Amino acid sequence: MRTIRLAASAVAALAVVAGLSGCDKDEEDHSAHTSSTIATPTTAAASSTATKLTGSSAAPLPPPSPTHPPHPAPSPISTVDPTPPPGPVTSTAPPVPPPVVDDVNCGPVTDAGGATRTVIAVGTADGRPGCTEAINVATAYVTTIAPSDSVVVLGWQCNSQPDTQVPQVCSKDGLVIALRAS
């Protein structure tokens, strides 16, 4: 009698567990769910196992529905870049000026009075004019008779200088053409 009570208690407990684990109060057919049967123990060692579960382990899962929603998609993995984004660079060191290019002797020109001048394309931080342009500007300047010491020639501002080595200079956009006395 005690074995039957034990078996009945085990069946009742399994029925509660089965009901909580998958059987909802929906109106679907649950005939494919696990059922239980009472087994009669035949030996003393088997007396503690009073029930045996049977059913189809290959039964298909119900399709997604309001009572059986599909599993959520896994969330994407995000990574954090350990290096900070580049920001403005601040430095306490003074800026390094660009290198100054060397002067170039472009050759002689003759002025309106017949004197010869040497045309020098002066190298500056802004660069150096080409010799063709320097010769053209210098030739136009030294052959022009102007009422003042300052004149604009081909877009270049040309001036007389108090320096006896370089008596005239023309400049434009940071570039310089020097006219040296020969």
Image (cartoon, rainbow, N blue to C red):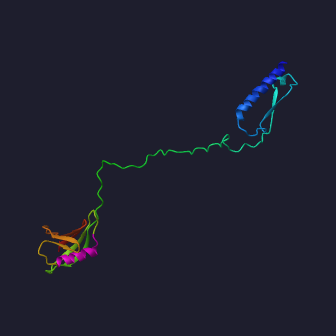
Q: Is residue 173 above or below residue 46?
A: below
Q: Is residue 178 visible?
A: no
Query: What are the residue bounds of the magenta stretch?
Result: 129-143
Q: Is residue 90 above or below residue 119?
A: above
Snapshot quadrant of residue 65: top right
181 relative position to 3: left or right: left
In percent of width and height, residue 142 lies at 17, 77
Of the pair 55 and 64, the residue shown nearer to us: 64
26 relative position to 88: left or right: right
Secondary structure mostly seen in the magenta stretch? helix
Residue beneath the point at 74% across and 32% down:
18
Residue beneath the point at 27% across and 74% down:
131
Residue 138 painted magenta: yes
Residue beneath the point at 45% across and 46% down:
83
Q: Residue furthest right?
A: 42
Snapshot quadrant of residue 37: top right
Of the pair 134 and 48, the residue shown nearer to us: 48
Of the pair 73 and 181, the residue shown nearer to us: 73
